[in-house]
Amino acid sequence: MSQQKADYVDDTEIDTGLDDHPDDETLEETVANLEANGFEVVVVDTADEALDAVQSQIPAGASVMNGHSTTLEEIGFEDYLGSGDHDWESLPDQVWSIDDDEERQAARRDAQTADYFLGGINAIASTGELVAADMSGSRIGAYPFAAGNVVIVSGTNKVVPTLDDAFDRLESVAYPLENERAQEAYGVGSAIAKQLVFRKEMEDGRTTVVLVRDQLGY
């Protein structure tokens, strides 16, 4: 059963000042700076609109992989990808059907080169940078280069003023919540083991950020 932020946020101590929504002027500035750094940006109001925006990004016949993302769960993407109600090649179905641990790990690595890789992000600096971390790297490994195209979905609650604030958000909001989720889901904690600062996208149209005016993910 999937877990969402509301399942454990009340039991986790976070810096709520780094988990709030920007005003309209700040959001407009953030979008402009992301676009100046080479990211395509789509702004929507609801989770349903976010799912529609994601679906519109991916053409029929594309291979699709996703990293774990509470945000993707909250907008319904993971259920949609698993439903088969689309014309894509679902790589998670292939990966998680493999029983052998080594073969499955190899398939997960191969899936980083999917035509479209989807995931969330842990913080967005209003100055136009994206910050994320994983314990294994299975999500952020695809973002810089491996995947053909990247679609990142984020609530606007992850927008913070500066890159330093983005690092603070990673440590004081995203990590405590992910650690709690991991302990409940897997019985072990998480770690900020591998960290990405995505400053610019150099390939036109490769990376799209879908910003949702909602309190999503962490």
Image: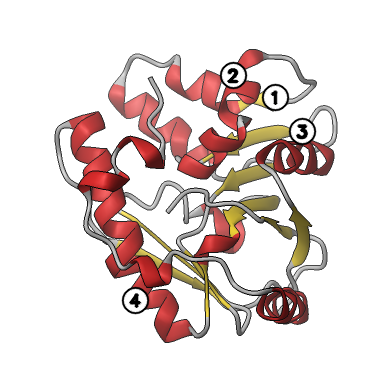
Residue 182 drawn above or below residue 140? above
Three-letter residue code for mark 4: Asp
**Label 3 crowding class (10 Å Cα cut-off): few <14, some 14-19, many 20+?**
some
Query: Which residue is the site of mark 1?
Result: 89
Q: CA distance from mark 1 to mark 2?
A: 11 Å
In this orientation, does residue 69 appear? no
Residue appearing at x 59%, y 19% in the figure: 82
- Residue 90 appears in which quarter of the rendering? top right
Query: Quick check: can you spot residue 103?
Result: yes
Q: Which residue is mark 4?
A: 168
N-terminal of the pair, mark 1 or mark 2, is 2
Camera-nearest label, 4 or 2: 4
Which residue is located at x 50 percent, y 85 percent? Answer: 162
Indicate which disc, 3 or 4, sits on the residue closer to the N terminus.
3
Q: Which mark is in front, 3 or 2?
A: 2
Check disc 2 and report the residue beneath it: 82
| Quadrant the C terminus occupies | bottom left
Q: Amino acid at mark 2?
A: Gly
